[in-house]
Image (cartoon, rainbow, N blue to C red):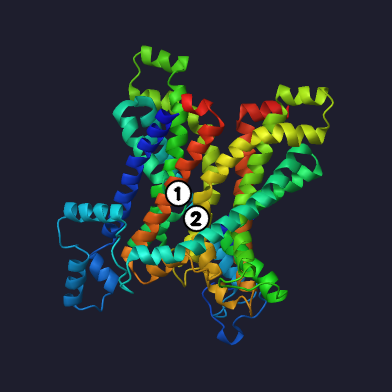
Amino acid sequence: MLIAIVAALFGPVVARFDPAAQDLARRLDGPSATHWFGLDELGRDILARVLAGARISLLVGIVVVSISSVVGTLLGAIAGYFGGPIDETISRAIDILLAFPGLLLAIALVAALGPSLTNVVVALSLIGWVGYARLVRGQVLRAREFEFVQAARALGAATPRILARHIIPTTLPAVTVQATLGMGGAILAEAALSFLGLGVQPPTPSWGTMLNGGRTHLLDAPHLTIFPGLAIAVLVLGFNFLGDGLRDALDPVTRRRAC
Amino acid sequence: MLRFLARRVALTIPVLFGVATLVFSLIHFIPGDPAQAMLGDSASPQDVAELRARLGLNRPLIEQYGRFLRGALRGDLGRSLRTDQPVTTAILERMPATVELAAAAMIVAVAFAIPLGIAAAAWRGTAVDHTATTLSLLGISIPNFWLGPLLAIVFSIELGWLPVSGRGTWAHLVLPAISLGAALAAILARMTRATLLEELREPYVTAARARGASRARAVVRHAFRNSLIPVITLIGLQFGAVLTGAVITETIFAWPGIGRLLIQSIGFRDYPLVQGCILLIAVTYVGMNLVTDLLYSLVDPRIRFE
């Protein structure tokens, strides 16, 4: 994961080749001392494109998770704290969005809006907030009964202050874990949409788009498929490890068992 | 029980209504004129006006919505723009292929995950556990749009054992089923391990061991049985992930199911067919969740009283 972050930050500086530079005479060449990951169907350096693709993946992950977690936390906190018709409205919206399995709604939205990086971010954020809202709503339902929250209320603290200073902070450990795992999910979703031709459009280097391009060359140039896929798997695995580790570290039950 | 059943079914109705509303709205998310977008920029104004009339886009929104809902209830989702075939017929023709693939993927997942989860829990903290846990994390992290081509490279291209694409014999099913079932297997193995570890801490397992039951018997005959309930629930709830995964797997292996039909329809801007596929997959998912909830309440009566 660290490698991917370093690659995203410094990849374009350290890469020996321009990810867009073509060498058609040597198209589909396999890995060599000059081109470590080989060349693609237009003779572009795959390593340079994988490094440039890290930027897209991390950018999508960060933007989607930021929007989703902020919107989801706010809506979940409002639903859980106020209850009544506000909770009903937000909860029904959550139910309806959860009725669409995984990526399906993102596929549908991008199909309507048109394939582009911006639309991928919009689609993934529109469905992403739901998980956070459901998680935070549950936590807030419990937190609003805590004595320190009731004390703040009794002292006359305004509702926005109670939410911002007392309730939402209690949900942050769970939101942090969800956001870490969500980074992996968003990166996978962007790659899946790009793989299906609904995300980042060529010639922009995205790992999903590169895998899609590699499909037609499975027989003669499997390296087109192997390296971008490996990059996705390693980065997502990193976020999943980090998410699992954070969950274990932040969950008092797991921590007690480990002791 | 009947009251619980009625309440659970009643809760599903607004969700289905919301799903239908969202699917109806999709066509209106299209920037600009949806009819122009479907026909492309080169279409003549007359063709665009004709399509607009055919799809009812020139009528008031509320009337379009009413017609869509009435049609959906009757199973009439309009006609494909490209083939003029009724959308419902096109989808029903592809349904058996998707059901076959989803069922095979779930069988593969369960066959791998349950033994792996049991082994990890039974030998907790050992090399077996670490291997199983790492395999599970790998399964979750490796996207099926990479695993599929990798499997094809090894088993079809290098070894020549299995066909690379298409549908027909059981051999065609092997690679798509493994590719689609791997992530589910990973999630199930983690869940099996976690629930089994919970059960192994229960006093009845200690009692069984005190009565002389072997460790293997305590795990398999006592703890595993009780840990199955959440695992079965998860299998039901993961059905949606399998359906979405099928969209990708069918595209990779040219499997003639609903997922591939959906992606092809998006490519052709055949929006009535896109709406039909999305609606069918979402409704199937809601239905599966309902069935899972009802089965869960049958197995565990405490659910009904919550």
Q: Nearer the viewer, residue B158 or A151?
A: B158
The chain ID associated with circle 1 is B
Q: Nearer the viewer, residue B229 or A51?
A: B229
Q: Residues within 10 Å of mark 2 (few under 14, many from 20)?
A: many
Position in image of residue A171 (x %, y %): 49, 30
Q: Which disc, if any, is residue B171?
A: none
- Secondary element type, mark 2: helix
Quadrant of the rendering where the N terminus of chain B is positioned = top left
- Secondary element type, mark 1: helix
Position in image of residue A160 (x %, y %): 34, 26
The chain ID associated with circle 2 is B
Kind of residue indicated by mark 1 = Tyr
Q: Residues within 10 Å of mark 1 (few under 14, many from 20)?
A: many
The residue under the point 68% across, 30% down is B199
Kind of residue indicated by mark 2 = Leu
Q: Is residue B293 left or right of residue A249?
A: left
The residue under the point 69% across, 51% down is B112
Q: Is residue A172 left or right of residue B108?
A: left
Q: Which residue is mark 1?
A: B285
The image quadrant of residue B75 is bottom left
Do the residues bearing badges 2 and 1 touch, measured as CB atoms within 8 Å? yes
Position in image of residue B104 (x %, y %): 60, 58
The image quadrant of residue B121 is top right
Q: Which residue is mark 2?
A: B243
Determine if residue A206 is in view: no
Report the label total.
Answer: 2
The image quadrant of residue B166 is bottom right
- Is tag 2's residue or tag 1's residue first in the polypeptide sequence? 2
Determine if residue A157 is in view: yes
Residue A72, above or below B252: above
